[in-house]
Amino acid sequence: MLIRPDRRDLGLIGLYTGRIITGLGLVMLIPAVLGVVRAEYNDALGLLIGAGVSLLLGRLAEWRLATSRDLGWSHAMATVALSWLVAAYLAAIPLYLSGHYGSFLDASFDAMSGFATAGLAVINDLDHVSDSINLWRHLMQFMGGQGLVLIALSLFGGAGGLAGLYVGEGREDRILPNVRRTASFIWRVALLYLLFGGVMLWAAVVHAGMPALDGLLHAVMLFMAAFDTGGFLPTSASLGVYHSAVVEATASILMVAGAFSFALHYQLMRGTGPVEMVRNIETRVLAVTVVGLSAITMIGLARFETYDSVEALLRRGFFHLLSAHTGTGFGTIPGRLFVTDWGVLAPAMVVIAMALGGMASSTTGGVKAIRVGVLAKSVANDIQRIVLPTDAVVVGAYHSNGRNEALRPAVVRTAVLITLLYLVLYFAGAFLGMFYGYSIQESLFESTSAAAAVGLSVGVVGPDVEEGLKVFYIFQMWIGRLEFISVFALFGYLYATIRGRL
């Protein structure tokens, strides 16, 4: 029974939401400084206004709602869902003031897309956006990939009950003994990859012909988009603007790294990664699905005679399948070609890859490999029970995060439930797209891309897309990135507040 939340409950949620947006405001100062350095004063002012509003609200929450109470599990879940919504609207302030958005709804769409690492965009004239606004767009991906709540875990980790915040962002593995140390480790991993991945990408884009100084900024933004599987890029041509196989190959390495869980990165840094990669159920599932879906994609493209060489099949077919599966959303071709030049089979494989996603507790969205693996193990066990003698005992197990786990019924039920919820979300967006007159292929492609936080598009999403679709895609990106539970908790609080008692 859920009693109506009182002022103390709502105040606790507001306090921690304020702490999260305080961190957001501090990060917003980084592109503001770049705007001043690059003489982009109007956009720097917009960023300062956004930062000022965020910091003011955060400080007001700290002043008015300060308490020594610890977060309960339900408080933490509701805080996560609320903070992501509030953060998206605050982050939209400098985007809207930049003049590149037709409405505040459009700016909020791109802000949620950034935090959810979806990469879908409704911005106008992207090729002429200032460096400071572009950096802010990519910083949103960087924060969203690691998790907005990690800001609170890192800055305010002394309070109790923060484990619920960590889990509320769709993370399940606690890599180190407590969540604050886990949060610090995740930031260290991200910064380490930024150092080495940024250098690799800088060399790649300079090799592609970009000036060194511009190439450095592009490399940093490209890293944030690749490792955090976000998909935003500073140009409308996405990765195709570089016309470089080296850039594509380098980005692919970081895309795969972003699709790996942070627990696997921990194993790699301990030196046990190679063994773990062979035994881990998620790496096995990803190996099978990437290879299988890629093969079918290239067969479909070959049958449709879309490309006439093996190199073109790999650079177009395999790259886009990998981009979809890792949830990155990079493209090297115009999105409309998926429905005009790719036939039917290849785009279908891209949609399936988007729906599946990468590993749990990574920067990707979608169903996740762990759930696919658990469901496959469960089906295999059921088949064994049927074919073996009735007195045979079938014990299911799988290997994950360095240890063997029992295939418990509760684990299977959770995997089935979350998978079904994602399928409902994918098809709900597809039905809405068809309501607005788009074909089933276009509607399902865009809906899956939004709900699984991928960012590939066949051209439906853009500045002129219907407002009803924009609102629903924002909802899909929000609930899909948080994997439902924390959003349900927030809805439960709202319902209990209004109705009094459930």
Image (cartoon, grey):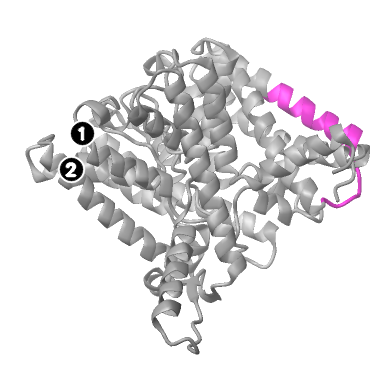
Q: CA distance from mark 2 to mark 1?
A: 8 Å
Please state the horizontal and vertical placement of residue 432, each as a whole percent of the image.
49, 25
Residue 271: quarter of image? bottom left
Please state the horizontal and vertical placement of residue 406, each as a whole percent of the image.
55, 76
* Residue at (56, 28) in percent of width and height: 474
Is 188 on the left or on the right of 381, as rendered?
A: right
* Residue at (44, 31) in percent of width and height: 430
Q: Where does the magenta region start and end? A: 51-71
Q: Which mark is residue 331?
A: none
Please state the horizontal and vertical placement of residue 289, each as a whole percent of the image.
32, 56
Type of amino acid under label 2:
Gly
* Residue at (52, 22) in percent of width and height: 470
Q: Is residue 203 visible?
A: no
Answer few, some or many: residues within 10 Å of disc 2's Cα (few below 14, many 20 plus, some between 14 and 19).
many
Q: Is residue 17 magenta-colored?
A: no
Q: Secondary structure at mark 1?
A: loop
- The correct choice, above or below, for 31 with respect to 97 in the image is below
Q: Is residue 65 magenta-colored?
A: yes
Which is the main secondary structure of the residues drawn in magenta? helix
Which residue is disc 2 drawn over? 300
- Viewer-side residue, 99 vs 81: 81
- In the orientation shown, which residue stands out farthest toward the left? 308
Q: Which mark is residue 342?
A: 1
